[in-house]
Image (cartoon, rainbow, N blue to C red):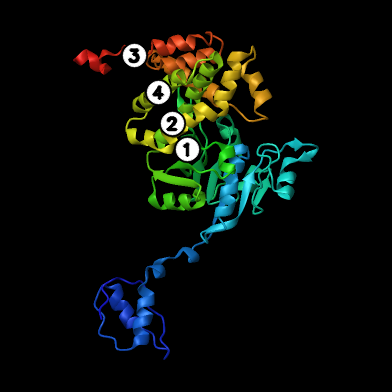
Amino acid sequence: FRFDRPLLRCLQRNKEGRRWGRHGQRIALGLPVPYVRSRVVKATLFRALRPEAFNNERNMPAHKVSIIGSGNWGSAIARIIGENVKKFDIFDHNVRMYVYEEIVDGRKLTEIINTQHENVKYLPGYKLPENVSAVPDIVAACEDADVLVFVLPHKFIVPTCRPLVGKVKPGAIGLSLIKGFDIAPGGGGIELISNVIHKLLNIEMCVLMGANLAREVADKKFCETTIGCRDPEKGVLLKKLIQTDYFRVTVVDDIPTIEVCGALKNIVAVGAGFVDGLGYGDNTKAAVIRLGLMEMIAFADTFYPGARLGTFFESCGVADLVTTCYGGRNRKVAEAFVRSNKSIEELEKEMLNGQKLQGPETAEEVFTMLKNKNMLDRFPLFVAIHRICSHEIAPSEMIQCIKNHPEHMNPERDIASNL
């Protein structure tokens, strides 16, 4: 009867009260244990050597989770997190959600959420778990948090995070669900939101992007998502926090590409909305989606060397692009923009109930960077979408853009030219 597996300790007692420290020391050194006649001793050692004995999950301090943001997506993800933390001992069962205070029907939004357990403004009709509490103070909401989940419009990330500088728990990790870019220092380029948060708060950042329309997630309709995380252990932790039987998670380590996909797909979705507004069909929209995907890949390859093509085939890539081009708010507002004489800003206020539109702003940020780098001609679809949003050209120019796109003018890609 031999044990060759190391064991950190073997201090269980048998019914006679003896310690089996001598055997435990030999096991810890990887040495064989002498023949043991007692069935009680055998059973004791076997229990000690089970895989479960090495699982210290219950002995670890519970991770506290805070959510920063409470729009429709923030509230939808709060429903998942609030339920999941109750399933695992590694999480504190109470979740704090930072809510920008607003007055709704004469009452504070935080008061409504904490009494009715529903975000009646941004996700009405869906109950939040009772262990999710709304907190109007950002510092109080994030106090002693081990996991910070960022889910708010990208334009608000810097002013929201500034009060947290120097007040985040050492060793905390962040998970960004924010789809967009920030303006790089100097104004000549863009910066990934995860990098912005990392620099401000000095915490390790991970990201989550995917084909995840908030209301469908709230309805518990099946979908997939992608978490970008370089540390395998933290990836496992975040997967436990987020995954359900209807919200399936894949963890990959290609963080920049995941984040680029999440930002750029909103620009393409605006273009898809223009096509809908102009009355063209699904064939034309498919062309916009394909050309948009090509520019997304080229953008990642140009500005983020090391980007992996395979990442575009995760939920964060093609899946999110298609979903957003058919069902997202960017497409919806862009269609209305073409069919009305109203500005993007006016339509945003009328149609989104306080939610923010990401696509036009991201298009402007990308346009500015491309212009500064003299690279406008390499991304004609992104450029055309920005110019339509800013009234520089008519929406009908969108069709000319895709007709004359360089992808159609490259003889090296034309199989017939090589025959």
User: Is residue 47 shown above or below 156?
Assistant: below
- Between residue 160 and residue 64, name the one nearer to us: 64
Which label sits on residue 290? 4
The residue type indicated by label 2 comes to: Cys
Q: Secondary structure at mark 1?
A: strand
Residue 198 seen by the camera: yes
The residue type indicated by label 3 comes to: His
- Please say if the residues under marks 1 and 4 sit with CB atoms less than 8 Å apart: no
Quadrant of res 122: top right
Q: Which residue is mark 3?
A: 408
Mark whose residue sits in front, 1 or 4:
4
- Please say if the residues under marks 2 and 1 sit with CB atoms less than 8 Å apart: yes
Q: Is residue 103 left or right of residue 270?
A: right
Q: Residue furthest left?
A: 419
Disc 3 versus disc 1: distance between alpha carbons? 30 Å
Q: Give percent across and percent down for residue 326.
A: 51, 27
User: Is residue 7 shown above or below 91?
Assistant: below
> Which circle's residue, 1 or 4, is located before the other in the chain?
1
Q: Give percent across and percent down for residue 226.
A: 44, 41
Q: Residue furthest right?
A: 106
Q: Badge 2, how many Cα within 10 Å: few under 14, some, many 20+?
A: many
> Which circle's residue, 3 or 4, is located before the other in the chain?
4
The residue type indicated by label 1 comes to: Met
Q: Residue at x 81, y 37 (%)?
A: 106
Q: Which residue is mark 1?
A: 209
Mark whose residue sits in front, 3 or 2:
3
User: Is residue 76 shown above or below 306?
Assistant: below
Q: Which residue is mark 2?
A: 261
